[in-house]
Amino acid sequence: MNDVFPTPKPMWRRLSWFWAAFWLLMLAVSVQESLWMGHLQVWRPLVDTGSSAIAATVLAIVQIRRADRLSRLLNQPIRWFLRLWAWMPLQFVAFVTGMYALRLAVYALAGQRYRHGPWPAVLTYEVTSFLLYFTLFSGIHFGLRSYRAWVDERLVAERQVSLARQIQLAQLTQQLQPHFLFNALNTISSLIHSDPDSADRLLTRLATLLRATTDASQRPEQPLADELALLRAYAAIMTQRFADRVRITWDIDPAAHDCHVPTLALQPLLENCFHHVVERRMAPTHIAIRGTCREGRLDIEIEDDGDLQQVPERRGVGLGNLAQRLQSLHGGEARLDLRVRAGGGLIVGVSLPCAH
Protein backbone atom coordinates (compact mmCIF):
# COMPACT_ATOMS: atom_id res chain seq x y z
CA MET A 1 0.00 0.00 0.00
CA ASN A 2 2.84 2.39 0.79
CA ASP A 3 4.17 1.94 -2.73
CA VAL A 4 0.89 3.30 -4.11
CA PHE A 5 -0.04 5.96 -1.58
CA PRO A 6 2.54 8.41 -0.20
CA THR A 7 3.18 8.39 3.54
CA PRO A 8 2.81 11.59 5.59
CA LYS A 9 6.57 12.16 5.65
CA PRO A 10 6.80 13.96 2.31
CA MET A 11 3.98 16.24 3.49
CA TRP A 12 5.95 17.21 6.62
CA ARG A 13 9.04 17.84 4.51
CA ARG A 14 7.09 20.26 2.34
CA LEU A 15 5.63 22.00 5.38
CA SER A 16 9.08 22.36 6.94
CA TRP A 17 9.78 25.15 4.46
CA PHE A 18 6.81 27.10 5.81
CA TRP A 19 7.98 26.40 9.37
CA ALA A 20 11.46 27.71 8.57
CA ALA A 21 10.00 30.77 6.82
CA PHE A 22 7.82 31.53 9.87
CA TRP A 23 10.76 31.51 12.27
CA LEU A 24 12.93 33.54 9.91
CA LEU A 25 10.15 36.13 9.86
CA MET A 26 10.03 36.07 13.68
CA LEU A 27 13.80 36.60 13.79
CA ALA A 28 13.53 39.56 11.42
CA VAL A 29 10.76 41.12 13.52
CA SER A 30 12.78 40.67 16.74
CA VAL A 31 15.86 42.28 15.23
CA GLN A 32 13.83 45.16 13.80
CA GLU A 33 12.11 45.73 17.14
CA SER A 34 15.46 45.70 18.95
CA LEU A 35 16.95 48.25 16.56
CA TRP A 36 13.85 50.43 16.80
CA MET A 37 14.24 50.50 20.60
CA GLY A 38 17.88 51.56 20.26
CA HIS A 39 19.47 48.23 21.19
CA LEU A 40 22.40 47.75 18.83
CA GLN A 41 23.40 44.27 20.02
CA VAL A 42 21.61 42.33 17.29
CA TRP A 43 22.81 38.97 18.57
CA ARG A 44 20.55 39.21 21.65
CA PRO A 45 17.20 39.00 19.79
CA LEU A 46 18.75 36.37 17.55
CA VAL A 47 19.57 34.25 20.60
CA ASP A 48 16.18 34.83 22.24
CA THR A 49 14.12 34.04 19.13
CA GLY A 50 16.51 31.33 17.94
CA SER A 51 16.25 29.44 21.24
CA SER A 52 12.45 29.62 21.01
CA ALA A 53 12.60 28.31 17.43
CA ILE A 54 14.85 25.39 18.40
CA ALA A 55 12.72 24.43 21.40
CA ALA A 56 9.51 24.73 19.36
CA THR A 57 10.97 22.61 16.53
CA VAL A 58 12.00 19.86 18.94
CA LEU A 59 8.54 19.94 20.49
CA ALA A 60 6.91 19.77 17.03
CA ILE A 61 9.02 16.75 16.07
CA VAL A 62 8.08 14.99 19.33
CA GLN A 63 4.40 15.73 18.73
CA ILE A 64 4.55 14.43 15.15
CA ARG A 65 6.29 11.24 16.28
CA ARG A 66 3.72 10.67 19.02
CA ALA A 67 0.82 11.38 16.67
CA ASP A 68 2.08 8.69 14.28
CA ARG A 69 0.79 6.16 16.82
CA LEU A 70 -2.61 7.84 17.08
CA SER A 71 -3.79 7.56 13.47
CA ARG A 72 -6.47 5.05 14.46
CA LEU A 73 -8.11 7.77 16.60
CA LEU A 74 -8.50 10.39 13.85
CA ASN A 75 -12.19 9.52 13.61
CA GLN A 76 -12.48 10.23 17.36
CA PRO A 77 -11.14 13.81 17.70
CA ILE A 78 -11.72 14.13 21.45
CA ARG A 79 -9.73 10.99 22.24
CA TRP A 80 -7.02 12.04 19.76
CA PHE A 81 -6.56 15.43 21.46
CA LEU A 82 -6.69 13.95 24.98
CA ARG A 83 -4.00 11.41 24.11
CA LEU A 84 -1.86 14.05 22.43
CA TRP A 85 -2.24 16.48 25.33
CA ALA A 86 -1.65 13.87 28.04
CA TRP A 87 2.03 14.79 28.33
CA MET A 88 1.58 18.52 27.87
CA PRO A 89 2.66 19.54 31.45
CA LEU A 90 5.90 17.59 31.14
CA GLN A 91 6.46 18.96 27.65
CA PHE A 92 5.96 22.49 28.95
CA VAL A 93 8.63 21.97 31.62
CA ALA A 94 11.03 20.50 29.02
CA PHE A 95 10.23 23.31 26.57
CA VAL A 96 10.88 26.17 29.02
CA THR A 97 13.91 24.46 30.58
CA GLY A 98 15.52 23.81 27.21
CA MET A 99 14.78 27.29 25.87
CA TYR A 100 16.19 29.14 28.89
CA ALA A 101 19.14 26.75 29.18
CA LEU A 102 20.13 27.64 25.62
CA ARG A 103 19.84 31.34 26.33
CA LEU A 104 21.85 31.15 29.55
CA ALA A 105 24.54 29.06 27.86
CA VAL A 106 24.93 31.38 24.85
CA TYR A 107 24.96 34.49 27.01
CA ALA A 108 27.55 32.88 29.29
CA LEU A 109 29.75 32.07 26.28
CA ALA A 110 29.46 35.70 25.23
CA GLY A 111 30.52 36.82 28.72
CA GLN A 112 27.12 38.35 29.35
CA ARG A 113 24.44 37.78 31.94
CA TYR A 114 21.02 36.86 30.71
CA ARG A 115 18.48 39.10 32.39
CA HIS A 116 14.80 38.33 32.68
CA GLY A 117 11.89 39.42 34.82
CA PRO A 118 10.66 37.77 38.01
CA TRP A 119 10.10 34.07 37.54
CA PRO A 120 6.36 34.19 38.41
CA ALA A 121 5.83 36.76 35.66
CA VAL A 122 8.08 34.83 33.28
CA LEU A 123 6.28 31.55 33.92
CA THR A 124 2.87 33.20 33.52
CA TYR A 125 3.93 34.61 30.14
CA GLU A 126 5.49 31.32 29.02
CA VAL A 127 2.45 29.25 30.10
CA THR A 128 0.14 31.54 28.12
CA SER A 129 2.39 31.48 25.06
CA PHE A 130 2.87 27.71 25.28
CA LEU A 131 -0.85 27.00 25.57
CA LEU A 132 -1.59 29.23 22.59
CA TYR A 133 1.18 27.63 20.53
CA PHE A 134 0.24 24.10 21.60
CA THR A 135 -3.46 24.63 20.79
CA LEU A 136 -2.80 26.13 17.36
CA PHE A 137 -0.20 23.51 16.48
CA SER A 138 -2.44 20.64 17.63
CA GLY A 139 -5.39 21.97 15.62
CA ILE A 140 -3.33 22.38 12.45
CA HIS A 141 -1.69 19.02 13.08
CA PHE A 142 -5.05 17.27 13.42
CA GLY A 143 -6.41 18.98 10.31
CA LEU A 144 -3.45 17.94 8.18
CA ARG A 145 -3.52 14.35 9.37
CA SER A 146 -7.28 14.11 8.88
CA TYR A 147 -6.95 15.47 5.34
CA ARG A 148 -4.10 13.03 4.60
CA ALA A 149 -6.18 10.12 5.91
CA TRP A 150 -9.20 11.24 3.87
CA VAL A 151 -7.10 11.46 0.70
CA ASP A 152 -5.61 8.01 1.32
CA GLU A 153 -9.04 6.47 1.93
CA ARG A 154 -10.39 8.09 -1.22
CA LEU A 155 -7.48 6.77 -3.29
CA VAL A 156 -7.94 3.29 -1.82
CA ALA A 157 -11.67 3.43 -2.55
CA GLU A 158 -11.05 4.63 -6.11
CA ARG A 159 -8.53 1.86 -6.68
CA GLN A 160 -10.96 -0.74 -5.34
CA VAL A 161 -13.71 0.61 -7.60
CA SER A 162 -11.30 0.50 -10.54
CA LEU A 163 -10.28 -3.07 -9.78
CA ALA A 164 -13.90 -4.13 -9.38
CA ARG A 165 -14.74 -2.45 -12.68
CA GLN A 166 -11.87 -4.24 -14.42
CA ILE A 167 -13.01 -7.58 -13.01
CA GLN A 168 -16.57 -6.88 -14.11
CA LEU A 169 -15.42 -5.92 -17.61
CA ALA A 170 -13.29 -9.05 -17.81
CA GLN A 171 -16.28 -11.20 -16.84
CA LEU A 172 -18.56 -9.44 -19.31
CA THR A 173 -15.98 -9.82 -22.08
CA GLN A 174 -15.61 -13.54 -21.40
CA GLN A 175 -19.37 -13.89 -21.80
CA LEU A 176 -19.07 -12.66 -25.38
CA GLN A 177 -16.70 -15.37 -26.55
CA PRO A 178 -18.87 -18.54 -26.58
CA HIS A 179 -21.86 -16.76 -28.15
CA PHE A 180 -19.77 -15.02 -30.78
CA LEU A 181 -17.55 -18.02 -31.50
CA PHE A 182 -20.49 -20.33 -32.09
CA ASN A 183 -22.03 -18.04 -34.72
CA ALA A 184 -18.74 -17.32 -36.50
CA LEU A 185 -17.66 -20.99 -36.65
CA ASN A 186 -21.09 -21.97 -37.90
CA THR A 187 -20.70 -19.49 -40.76
CA ILE A 188 -17.20 -20.68 -41.66
CA SER A 189 -18.14 -24.38 -41.48
CA SER A 190 -20.71 -23.85 -44.22
CA LEU A 191 -17.91 -22.73 -46.58
CA ILE A 192 -15.21 -25.31 -45.86
CA HIS A 193 -16.25 -27.72 -48.62
CA SER A 194 -17.91 -25.34 -51.07
CA ASP A 195 -15.32 -22.53 -50.95
CA PRO A 196 -12.11 -23.50 -49.06
CA ASP A 197 -10.26 -20.30 -49.99
CA SER A 198 -13.03 -18.12 -48.60
CA ALA A 199 -13.17 -20.27 -45.46
CA ASP A 200 -9.44 -19.81 -45.00
CA ARG A 201 -9.71 -16.02 -45.31
CA LEU A 202 -12.60 -15.98 -42.88
CA LEU A 203 -10.64 -18.06 -40.37
CA THR A 204 -7.90 -15.44 -40.47
CA ARG A 205 -10.43 -12.73 -39.78
CA LEU A 206 -11.94 -14.83 -37.00
CA ALA A 207 -8.52 -15.17 -35.38
CA THR A 208 -8.21 -11.38 -35.43
CA LEU A 209 -11.59 -10.99 -33.79
CA LEU A 210 -10.89 -13.63 -31.13
CA ARG A 211 -7.60 -11.93 -30.30
CA ALA A 212 -9.47 -8.67 -29.84
CA THR A 213 -12.03 -10.42 -27.63
CA THR A 214 -9.28 -11.88 -25.46
CA ASP A 215 -7.53 -8.52 -25.13
CA ALA A 216 -10.72 -6.63 -24.35
CA SER A 217 -10.35 -7.15 -20.58
CA GLN A 218 -6.94 -5.43 -20.72
CA ARG A 219 -8.16 -2.85 -23.23
CA PRO A 220 -11.76 -2.12 -22.24
CA GLU A 221 -11.98 0.84 -24.64
CA GLN A 222 -10.52 1.67 -28.02
CA PRO A 223 -10.94 4.34 -30.74
CA LEU A 224 -14.01 3.95 -32.92
CA ALA A 225 -11.74 3.57 -35.95
CA ASP A 226 -10.24 0.38 -34.45
CA GLU A 227 -13.68 -0.84 -33.41
CA LEU A 228 -14.97 -0.34 -36.93
CA ALA A 229 -12.04 -2.34 -38.35
CA LEU A 230 -13.12 -5.29 -36.19
CA LEU A 231 -16.76 -4.75 -37.11
CA ARG A 232 -15.92 -4.78 -40.82
CA ALA A 233 -14.03 -8.05 -40.31
CA TYR A 234 -17.09 -9.57 -38.66
CA ALA A 235 -19.34 -8.17 -41.38
CA ALA A 236 -17.11 -9.79 -44.00
CA ILE A 237 -17.50 -13.16 -42.29
CA MET A 238 -21.29 -12.92 -42.17
CA THR A 239 -21.89 -11.41 -45.61
CA GLN A 240 -19.83 -14.22 -47.11
CA ARG A 241 -22.52 -16.62 -45.93
CA PHE A 242 -25.52 -14.43 -46.78
CA ALA A 243 -24.10 -12.64 -49.81
CA ASP A 244 -27.37 -12.63 -51.74
CA ARG A 245 -29.56 -11.75 -48.75
CA VAL A 246 -27.84 -8.81 -47.02
CA ARG A 247 -26.44 -5.40 -47.92
CA ILE A 248 -24.52 -3.24 -45.44
CA THR A 249 -23.94 0.49 -45.83
CA TRP A 250 -21.60 2.55 -43.72
CA ASP A 251 -22.04 6.26 -42.90
CA ILE A 252 -19.43 7.25 -40.30
CA ASP A 253 -18.52 10.83 -39.49
CA PRO A 254 -14.69 11.15 -39.75
CA ALA A 255 -14.78 13.34 -36.63
CA ALA A 256 -16.02 10.32 -34.66
CA HIS A 257 -13.09 8.03 -35.47
CA ASP A 258 -11.02 9.12 -32.46
CA CYS A 259 -13.85 8.76 -29.93
CA HIS A 260 -13.37 5.81 -27.60
CA VAL A 261 -15.98 3.06 -27.36
CA PRO A 262 -16.08 -0.22 -25.40
CA THR A 263 -14.04 -2.84 -27.21
CA LEU A 264 -16.26 -5.13 -29.28
CA ALA A 265 -19.33 -3.08 -28.38
CA LEU A 266 -20.74 -2.94 -31.90
CA GLN A 267 -20.19 -6.56 -32.94
CA PRO A 268 -23.09 -7.90 -30.79
CA LEU A 269 -25.42 -5.31 -32.35
CA LEU A 270 -24.56 -6.39 -35.88
CA GLU A 271 -24.70 -10.04 -34.79
CA ASN A 272 -28.29 -9.50 -33.62
CA CYS A 273 -29.22 -8.21 -37.08
CA PHE A 274 -27.96 -11.39 -38.69
CA HIS A 275 -29.31 -13.77 -36.05
CA HIS A 276 -32.79 -12.27 -35.65
CA VAL A 277 -33.40 -10.83 -39.12
CA VAL A 278 -31.17 -12.08 -41.93
CA GLU A 279 -31.22 -15.75 -40.89
CA ARG A 280 -35.00 -15.76 -40.42
CA ARG A 281 -36.20 -14.20 -43.67
CA MET A 282 -35.60 -14.90 -47.32
CA ALA A 283 -36.12 -11.31 -48.48
CA PRO A 284 -32.98 -9.15 -48.83
CA THR A 285 -32.10 -7.19 -45.72
CA HIS A 286 -30.48 -3.77 -45.65
CA ILE A 287 -28.35 -2.93 -42.59
CA ALA A 288 -27.25 0.67 -42.14
CA ILE A 289 -24.42 1.55 -39.73
CA ARG A 290 -24.16 5.25 -38.82
CA GLY A 291 -21.88 7.20 -36.50
CA THR A 292 -21.83 10.92 -35.69
CA CYS A 293 -20.00 13.13 -33.23
CA ARG A 294 -21.69 16.35 -32.09
CA GLU A 295 -21.14 18.57 -29.06
CA GLY A 296 -18.82 16.13 -27.36
CA ARG A 297 -21.08 13.08 -27.74
CA LEU A 298 -20.76 10.05 -29.97
CA ASP A 299 -23.98 8.58 -31.39
CA ILE A 300 -23.96 5.24 -33.20
CA GLU A 301 -26.94 3.54 -34.82
CA ILE A 302 -27.33 0.13 -36.41
CA GLU A 303 -30.58 -0.16 -38.35
CA ASP A 304 -32.20 -3.04 -40.17
CA ASP A 305 -35.30 -3.07 -42.39
CA GLY A 306 -36.69 -6.33 -41.06
CA ASP A 307 -40.26 -7.23 -40.17
CA LEU A 308 -40.22 -6.24 -36.50
CA GLN A 309 -43.13 -4.00 -35.54
CA GLN A 310 -42.49 -3.47 -31.81
CA VAL A 311 -39.52 -3.22 -29.48
CA PRO A 312 -38.63 -6.61 -27.93
CA GLU A 313 -39.65 -6.91 -24.29
CA ARG A 314 -36.43 -8.71 -23.36
CA ARG A 315 -32.88 -7.97 -24.41
CA GLY A 316 -30.62 -10.80 -25.45
CA VAL A 317 -27.13 -11.64 -24.20
CA GLY A 318 -25.38 -9.17 -26.50
CA LEU A 319 -27.56 -6.16 -25.71
CA GLY A 320 -27.67 -6.88 -21.98
CA ASN A 321 -23.91 -7.31 -21.92
CA LEU A 322 -23.34 -4.03 -23.74
CA ALA A 323 -25.72 -2.15 -21.43
CA GLN A 324 -23.76 -3.36 -18.40
CA ARG A 325 -20.43 -2.42 -19.95
CA LEU A 326 -21.66 1.09 -20.79
CA GLN A 327 -22.93 1.47 -17.22
CA SER A 328 -19.61 0.26 -15.82
CA LEU A 329 -17.53 2.62 -17.97
CA HIS A 330 -19.70 5.76 -18.11
CA GLY A 331 -22.52 5.43 -15.59
CA GLY A 332 -25.54 7.55 -16.45
CA GLU A 333 -23.69 9.45 -19.20
CA ALA A 334 -24.12 6.56 -21.67
CA ARG A 335 -27.30 4.93 -22.89
CA LEU A 336 -28.50 2.14 -25.13
CA ASP A 337 -31.83 2.75 -26.90
CA LEU A 338 -34.03 0.53 -29.04
CA ARG A 339 -36.80 1.84 -31.27
CA VAL A 340 -38.88 0.54 -34.15
CA ARG A 341 -38.03 1.76 -37.64
CA ALA A 342 -40.80 3.33 -39.69
CA GLY A 343 -42.07 0.60 -42.01
CA GLY A 344 -40.63 -2.23 -39.91
CA GLY A 345 -37.30 -3.15 -38.46
CA LEU A 346 -35.26 -2.11 -35.46
CA ILE A 347 -32.85 0.74 -34.76
CA VAL A 348 -30.36 0.23 -31.94
CA GLY A 349 -28.68 3.42 -30.78
CA VAL A 350 -25.64 3.88 -28.53
CA SER A 351 -24.88 7.32 -27.14
CA LEU A 352 -21.85 8.07 -24.94
CA PRO A 353 -19.34 10.85 -24.24
CA CYS A 354 -16.74 11.30 -26.95
CA ALA A 355 -13.57 10.69 -24.95
CA HIS A 356 -10.21 10.57 -26.72
Image: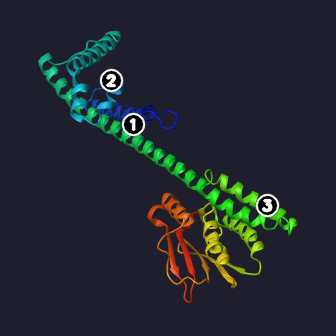
Question: Residue at 54% across / 61% down in the picture?
Answer: 321
Q: Which of 12 and 229 is in front in this view?
A: 229
Q: Nearer the viewer, residue 146 or 105?
A: 146
Q: Is mark 3 on a helix, strand or loop?
A: helix
Of tags 1 and 3, the one toward the viewer is: 3
Crowd around label 3: few <14 · some 14–19 · many ≥20 (10 Å): some
Q: Is residue 351 left or right of residue 56?
A: right
Vertical position of residue 306 compared to residue 1: above or below: below
Q: In this view, does 122 lie to the left or right of 276?
A: left
Q: Work out which residue is located at the far bottom of the displayed protein and give it.
A: 343
Asked whether the beta carbons under mark 2 and mark 3 sit within 8 Å of each other, the answer is no
Which of the two discs, 2 and 3, labels the residue nearer the N terminus? 2
Q: Name the residue under label 3.
A: 203
Would residue 46 be visible to someone looking at this image? Answer: no
Q: Mark 2 points at which residue?
A: 66
Q: Is mark 2 on a helix, strand or loop?
A: helix
* Residue 304: quarter of image: bottom right
Give x and y (percent) for residue 288: 65, 80
Would residue 19 be visible to someone looking at this image? Answer: yes
The three-letter code of the residue at mark 2 reads Arg
The three-letter code of the residue at mark 1 reads Phe
Q: Name the residue under label 1.
A: 18
Question: Residue at 60% across / 53% down in the picture?
Answer: 174
